[in-house]
Amino acid sequence: MTRHHLPNTSVDGQPVAPEALREQYEAGATVEELVAMSGLSYGTVLNRLREAGTVMRTSWQTRRLRDGQARRNLAAHLRRLYEQQGATLAELAAAGSVTRRAARRLLIEAGGTPRTTQQTLRIHSAANAARRMKLALFLRARYEAGATVPDLAEGCNYSVGTVYRLLHQAGTRMRPRHHHGPAHDPRKRS
């Protein structure tokens, strides 16, 4: 890991910025290394990291980030989640027990390309539409088997209006009001 020296003060004599410490920490540096690099006390480094909103790691997470093979395995896992399941950077961060910035860095290391917000929204919108259509077809099958709209609404914890919209989306031929049997085709006469 490349380590950069953090001076105790900046060129204009001001203390080391909390953001600079955070950047180094999120790149994998430990608090002890930041203390050695900056010349600041352990407590001051911790305070500045917290001031910058840094999500602190456990020692286990730090070892995993720094171990070459473990890091490559984690990066490959995050890339699979990102590309195959449409996970967001926030979801990658949670899955990898790292920050969003570290998750993005690992994704790039594994050869992945971060998406724009619009691309992510399109992926999630398509996935939601597919789930909604699957639910609509399920409700249609139950409705055509004789279930009532209120029963379907109660069973899936949706409003009656939502169930009607889903049935309409699935192209369901609706029964006359208050007719609780299977749908009848008017072209088929007894």
Image: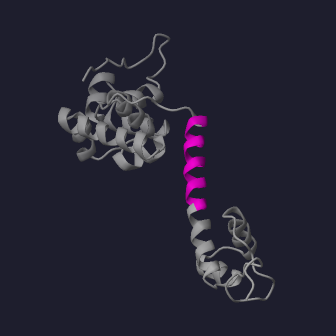
Q: Position of residue 58 (x, y in %)?
A: 29, 47
- The answer, for residue 55, to whether it is visible in the render is no
Return the x and y of residue 102 as percentages of the image width and height. Answer: 38, 35
Q: Quadrant of the C terminus?
A: bottom right
Q: Is residue 8 left or right of residue 1?
A: right
Q: Range of the magenta residues?
A: 118-133
Position above or below: 166 against 29: below
Q: Residue at x 59, y 67 (%)?
A: 137
Location of residue 41 in the rendering, given as x and y in whole percent from the top left corner: 33, 32
> Is 87 or 63 nearer to us in this picture?
87
Which residue is drawn at the image coordinates 72% and 82% (left, top)?
184
User: Quick one: which residue is furthest to the front in this view?
Assistant: 190
Depth order, front residue of 150/107: 150
Is residue 120 on the magenta stretch? yes
- Describe residue 97's horizontal placement relative to residue 114 as left or right: left
When the figure is inspected, residue 152 is found, relative to residue 61, above or below; the finding is below
Query: Is residue 88 covered in magenta?
Result: no
> Which image quarter is the N terminus in?
top left
Residue found at x 62% / y 76%:
157
Return the residue found at the far top. Answer: 11
Which residue occupies 77% across, 79% down?
Answer: 186
- Image coordinates of residue 40 in percent, x first then y, are 34, 28
Indicate the quadrant where residue 139 lies: bottom right
Q: Quadrant of residue 24?
A: top left
Q: How many marks?
A: 0
- Which secondary structure type mostly characterizes the magenta part of the structure? helix
Q: Is residue 125 visible from the viewing direction of this image?
A: yes
Where on the picture, by quarter, is residue 128? bottom right
